[in-house]
Image (cartoon, rainbow, N blue to C red):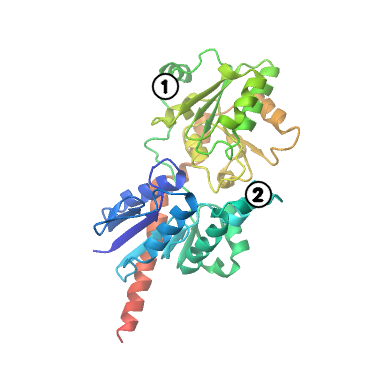
Amino acid sequence: MKQLLYIIRRNSGQGGAERVAERLAASFSDQFEVYRLWAGNQFNGQKIPGFSGILWWRHWRYAHYINRLAIYKQNSVVYSLEKGPTCDIYRAGDGVHRINMLGKYGSSKAWMVNPVHWLMPKLERNSFESARYIIANSELVRSQVVSAYPHVEHKMVAIYNGFDEQTFKLSQIDKLTLRKQLELPLDADKILLLSGSGFERKGLHHAIGIVKNLHERGCKAYLVVVGKGDSSYVKKLINQTGLIEFILFKGLINNVAQYYQASDMLVLLTRHDPFANACLEAWACGCPVITTRDNGASEVMKPFSGLLVDDILHKKAIGQCAEYIMQQAFEAPKIAASVEFLTADKEKAAHLEIVNKVFTEKSAEGHKARF
């Protein structure tokens, strides 16, 4: 039976890449012999390293271990979502490390003290150059890869993320009832939602600024935060604004779809996101979104689906977001219909096409080698 091996170091299931890896691995298990080579899993009787230790060591040790395995065969396809491993297919879900660091640090040299930022470009180059096909989940990512590695442009394939239409859909229950079930404030004029991991990159401080601006306009707004991240950096900001009771941290949850359905707006003013699944899931639930052009998901956004912010650092941006939230009315069915073409099944079909291409190419190469 043909083998399909999925490569990703992290396996907690909390990040976007991890969920993609598991979704694809599970969906292809009926067609291929699927292996999940997550760090900490067992493979050929050995525990895969890279699960513990300092970050740069985890990355290096994992990639080094994977590259020494006898998995690169004619009847196998190695599909990597991790920088470093040699592979047949590389999903560049994080874009290009150097470009991401420029966005985070700008002209500052602070990045130089972290060994990870020296290691990652070397690891990702191996994945980009070894892969037969490179999958970008947005034009944003594709353009980044081509600008940094122009010689791999011919390998690039664009496949947008997909959503589970059985989970993320319009609710048959009204918002007020949903809010009661979720124990959300019933006296709110507006409930804003931030969903994701890594709160600073996702723009939590900007979302708090919008809530403050709404209150100044006489709008009793709440911000509900779901996901995993460090919120300590906004503690002082929350205290200064006097919004402690209006910023609600829910942590990791299993029923995020209900939060999209119960909210008035998803606010994801991200510094960088290859393609934020949260936006796609929110739209599928009929929830409008405020996000930035630095989010690949903005490429599928419609004018009636929310607000696209060009420069969140502009002095008027926060006020413009608050004014938009107060003045706009939205049609949930129209928003949900706008992303019907991005289901998980269609994403799976696009990935399957690439996987089968690799098997076909390997088979032809093997045939030529015998003659």
Q: Amino acid at mark 1?
A: Ile
How far is the residue under mark 1 from the one under mark 2? 49 Å
Determine which quarter of the picture holds residue 328: top right
Tag 2 residue: 110
Kind of element beneath mark 1: loop
229 or 325, which lies in front? 229
- Name the image quarter holding the C terminus: bottom left
Q: Residue furthest right?
A: 315
**Residue drawn 69% across the image and 30% down it:** 318
Please report whichever mark, 1 or 2, sits nearer to the chain's N-terminal start.
Answer: 2
Rendering coords of residue 131 (x, y %)? 45, 66
Disc sitting over residue 29 in the figure: none
Location of residue 90 with respect to 330 vertically, above or below:
below
Rendering coords of residue 5 (x, y %)? 33, 59
Q: Amino acid at mark 2?
A: Ala
Crowding near the residue tagged with mark 2, few <14, some 14–19, many ≥20 C-alpha atoms within 10 Å: few
Tag 1 residue: 173
Rendering coords of residue 120 (x, y %)? 53, 58
- Name the image quarter holding the N terminus: bottom left
